[in-house]
């Protein structure tokens, strides 16, 4: 990583990229006029509100607001950082990403290079440790204990290999003897959570006497481990801590394996443990994931809904299981729209997915999944238990209990159905009362949207048209001066004009890329999504009209300034001539 990616390369890459082709490789698109549409891959919905424009090389969802160019899409959909997204897009077009020296100091550049190389070394080392654990399952002196345990859980050699399951003996330095070759390696192993710093600066193995389950990221790289103890030791399951390459709230155990086993996943089952995921795969349910010891986080749920349309949370039926389900539902509400579903299965006492599928088999277990409880039913069931729904006070209290959850839920058929059910069962069911409920329980975003409309101003319209049709900059005179105009947005307009004039072939996606991660970029993205209803054949005239209005404003401002100057301190000869010309124009 020698430096920054040159701006010219990014422009060239975006000029070559076809955002329709890119998006369609991941999301089925349908032609809709001059654009393409689909159900949004970034939130759940039934009616398509996700639009991809080939002309603008830009995507936008009118439901959740996600938008951007080809690089942005890869960053959001594949969850890549910017350099990785550029690498991914460049590889698609057989382009090699160059690097240039940046304006950082040599020390900063060196630090950046070290951090990048460190992560690459971390992935390599974790992969080697995983291979070591797998080998130990075959050669360790006490391997029979681990092998007997896995066979006793009904796992085949093929499943053990698919999930990369390994073993480490119950000794203090089984792994450290192999990988702790010097102080630098020792520190790396401590940093990666594979070793614990002991007395006299002598690290020892974190995982000992355990079946080892490697945790892989979306690219299949090993980033952490979960270890299941084989003795009476505690804890029963030991997990890797947070490290520079492992953030448990963002990862899902088994997702990589599920994608490898299913070319077209249609649903995912969220279970609590590593062994549940592996056991379900052993019996044909190879689409289970686990949330790595945390309540299912918004980031994990977002990943789930970007992968499939149906998510089923399968938990124990006890209080802890229901609490976990409630937290998952609460985190999922902002992501739920039509076309996708979140449902819940609560298992009988004493059962987990592993034990249940071994007793009843794949068909019976999948029948249980097919009859999972819908989100709306779970929501009603949970909240109605907290009030006396036979009393007026209880019914009123129930409406209040629903308020925060309905506010989190985006506009959808599901939300309409919940409101209608509330009105029919607890309010009275009249059209007036139903309308009042809809108004009262509109989300903050909906209320804000109802209040705010894009005000049409000359600056906003000029910027929006220049973004969509960059070539119209050619109609502007070379001597046009707006720099001194004191009006919001004029500075940004001038920057766009300069960029467009410097490259008459520039497209919308390239313009946006110049302002990535800036406040101006956010403003431009909003204007790119604005429906100004100016057709291409009228764009030049409307653009010139907007510029003329801005020039008139400039004349008015300059005239007022000179008149004020004349009253206060007087004008020099040049200023007097300018004022005379302005007043007579």
Image: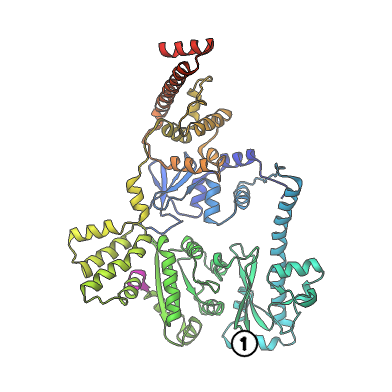
Q: Nearer the viewer, residue 209 or 45?
A: 209
Helix, strand or loop at mark 1: helix
Residue 172 vs residue 271: left or right? right
Report the magenta stretch's main SS. Answer: helix
Residue 26 image position (x, y, % from top left): 50, 55
Residue 13 vs residue 319: left or right? right
The residue under label 1 is: 149
Residue 298 vs residue 126: left or right? left
Residue 585 visible? The answer is: no
Residue 13 image position (x, y, % from top left): 60, 42
Colour option used: rainbow
Quick check: 328 above or below 433?
Answer: below
Quick check: 115 above or below 229?
Answer: above
Q: Nearer the viewer, residue 47 or 106?
A: 106
Q: Is residue 377 magenta?
A: yes
Name of the residue lying farthest toward the right: 182
Residue 488 image position (x, y, % from top left): 46, 34
Residue 137 vs residue 491: left or right? right
Residue 341 falls in image quadrant: bottom left
Name of the residue lying farthest toward the front: 568
Q: Nearer the viewer, residue 499 or 58?
A: 499
Question: Tag 1: Cα neighbours inside 10 Å, few (<14), some, or many (≥20)?
Answer: some
Residue 93 visible? The answer is: yes
Q: Nearer the viewer, residue 197 or 339?
A: 197
Query: Which residues, given as a range, are shown in magenta?
Result: 373-378
Residue at horizontal 67 percent and vertical 88 percent from the top: 145
How many circles with numbers are drawn on the protein? 1
Q: Is residue 120 magenta?
A: no
């Amino acid at each position: 990583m020698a430096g920054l990616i040159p701006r010219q390369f990014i422009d060239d890459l975006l000029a070559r990229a076809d955002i329709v082709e890119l998006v369609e490789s991941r999301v089925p698109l349908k032609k809709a006029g001059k654009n393409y549409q689909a159900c949004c891959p970034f939130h759940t919905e039934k009616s398509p509100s996700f639009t991809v424009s080939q002309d603008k090389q830009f995507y936008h969802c009118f439901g959740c607001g996600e938008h951007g160019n080809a690089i942005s899409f890869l960053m959001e959909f594949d969850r890549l950082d910017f350099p990785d997204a550029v690498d991914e897009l460049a590889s698609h077009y057989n382009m090699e990403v160059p690097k240039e020296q940046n304006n950082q100091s040599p020390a900063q550049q060196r630090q950046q290079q070290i951090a990048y190389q460190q992560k690459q070394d971390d992935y390599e080392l974790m992969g080697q440790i995983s291979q070591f654990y797998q080998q130990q399952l075959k050669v360790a002196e006490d391997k029979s204990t681990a092998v007997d345990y896995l066979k006793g859980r009904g796992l085949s050699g093929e499943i053990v290999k698919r999930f990369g399951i390994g073993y480490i003996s119950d000794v203090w330095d089984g792994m450290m003897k192999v990988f702790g070759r010097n102080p630098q390696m020792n520190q790396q192993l401590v940093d990666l959570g594979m070793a614990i710093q002991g007395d006299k600066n002598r690290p020892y193995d974190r995982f000992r006497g355990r079946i080892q389950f490697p945790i892989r990221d979306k690219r299949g790289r090993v980033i952490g481990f979960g270890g299941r103890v084989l003795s009476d030791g505690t804890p029963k399951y030991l997990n890797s801590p947070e490290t520079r390459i492992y953030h448990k709230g963002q990862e899902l155990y088994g997702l990589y394996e599920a994608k490898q086993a299913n070319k077209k996943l249609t649903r995912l089952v969220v279970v609590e443990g590593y062994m549940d995921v592996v056991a379900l795969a052993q019996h044909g349910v190879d689409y289970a994931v686990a949330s790595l010891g945390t309540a299912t986080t918004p980031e994990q749920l977002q990943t789930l809904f970007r992968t499939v349309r149906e998510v089923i949370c399968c938990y124990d039926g006890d209080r802890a299981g229901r609490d976990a389900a409630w937290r998952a539902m609460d985190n999922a509400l902002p992501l739920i729209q039509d076309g996708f579903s979140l449902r819940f299965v609560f298992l009988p006492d004493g059962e987990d997915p592993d034990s249940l599928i071994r007793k009843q088999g794949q068909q019976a277990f999948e029948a249980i999944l097919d009859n999972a409880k819908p989100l709306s039913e779970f929501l009603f069931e949970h909240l109605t238990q907290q009030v006396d729904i036979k009393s007026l006070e209880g019914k009123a209290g129930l409406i209040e209990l629903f308020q925060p959850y309905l506010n989190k839920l985006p506009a959808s058929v599901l939300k309409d159905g919940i409101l209608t059910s509330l009105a029919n069962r607890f309010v009275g069911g009249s059209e007036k009362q139903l309308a009042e409920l809809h108004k009262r329980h509109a989300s903050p975003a909906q209320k804000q949207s109802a209040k705010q409309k894009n005000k049409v101003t000359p600056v906003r319209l000029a910027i929006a048209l220049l973004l969509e049709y960059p070539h119209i900059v050619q109609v502007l005179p070379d001597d046009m001066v707006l720099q001194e105009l004191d009006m919001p947005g004029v500075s940004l307009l001038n920057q766009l004009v300069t960029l467009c004039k410097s490259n008459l072939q520039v497209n919308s996606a390239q313009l946006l890329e110049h302002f990535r991660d800036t406040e101006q970029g956010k403003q431009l993205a909003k204007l790119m999504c604005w429906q100004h209803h100016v057709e291409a054949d009228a764009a030049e005239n409307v653009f010139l009209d907007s510029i003329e209005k801005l020039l008139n404003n400039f004349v008015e401002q300059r005239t007022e300034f000179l008149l004020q100057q004349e009253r206060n301190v007087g004008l020099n000869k040049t200023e007097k001539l300018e004022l005379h010309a302005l007043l007579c124009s």
